[in-house]
Image (cartoon, rainbow, N blue to C red):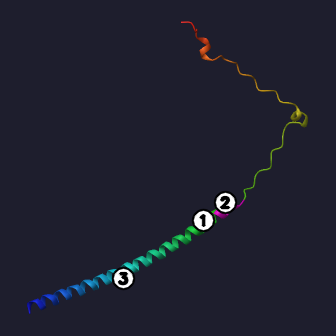
């Protein structure tokens, strides 16, 4: 008789724990569904913003007209003087005496 009562008590405890697990599982499913909806909304926002940024960067920017040259056509046709030559310094090894 005592064994039956103990077994019945164990079965009752297991039923309670199973019900608690079911409640927790339902809560987790609800939380997951909310999280999925939030992620979908964020994804839509991100997609919308990305499309907006892409659209803005695709619009060509107006460039200013080229500046008119202040030189006369003859001056532009004259050959330019070559750049001044640098002074040539011999390598350092030439400064030393080879004889020791």
Question: Vertically, is 39 above or below 85?
Answer: below
Indicate left or right for 33 with 7 as reference: right
**Looking at the rendering, which quadrant does residue 30 occupy?**
bottom left
Question: Vertically, is 10 above or below 56?
Answer: below
Q: Earlier in the sequence, mark 1 or mark 3?
A: 3
Q: CA distance from mark 1 to mark 2?
A: 11 Å
Q: Please, which residue is most extreme toward the right here? A: 74
Tell me the element at label 1.
Answer: helix
Residue annotated with mark 2: 57
Residue 55 magenta:
yes
Q: Which residues are magenta?
A: 54-59
Residue annotated with mark 3: 26
Dot 3 surroundings within 10 Å: few (below 14), some, or many (20 or more)? few
Q: CA distance from mark 1 to mark 3?
A: 36 Å
**Looking at the rendering, which quadrant does residue 22 occupy?**
bottom left
- Please name whichever residue, 94 or 18, is drawn nearer the observer in this view of the structure: 94
Question: Vertically, is 84 above or below 25?
Answer: above
Indicate left or right for 31 with 44 as reference: left
Q: Earlier in the sequence, mark 3 or mark 2?
A: 3
Tell me the element at label 3.
Answer: helix
Check residue 50 in the rendering and tell me which mark sits there, or answer none.
1
């Amino acid at each position: 008789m005592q064994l039956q009562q103990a077994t019945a008590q164990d079965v009752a405890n297991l039923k309670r724990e199973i019900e608690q697990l079911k409640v927790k599982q339902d809560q987790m499913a609800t939380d997951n569904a909310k999280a999925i909806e939030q992620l979908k909304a964020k994804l839509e926002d991100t997609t919308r913003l990305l499309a907006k940024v892409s659209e803005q960067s695709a619009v060509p920017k107006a460039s200013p007209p080229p500046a008119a040259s202040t030189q006369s056509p003859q001056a532009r046709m004259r050959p330019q003087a070559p750049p001044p030559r640098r002074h040539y310094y011999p390598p350092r090894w030439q400064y030393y005496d080879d004889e020791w």
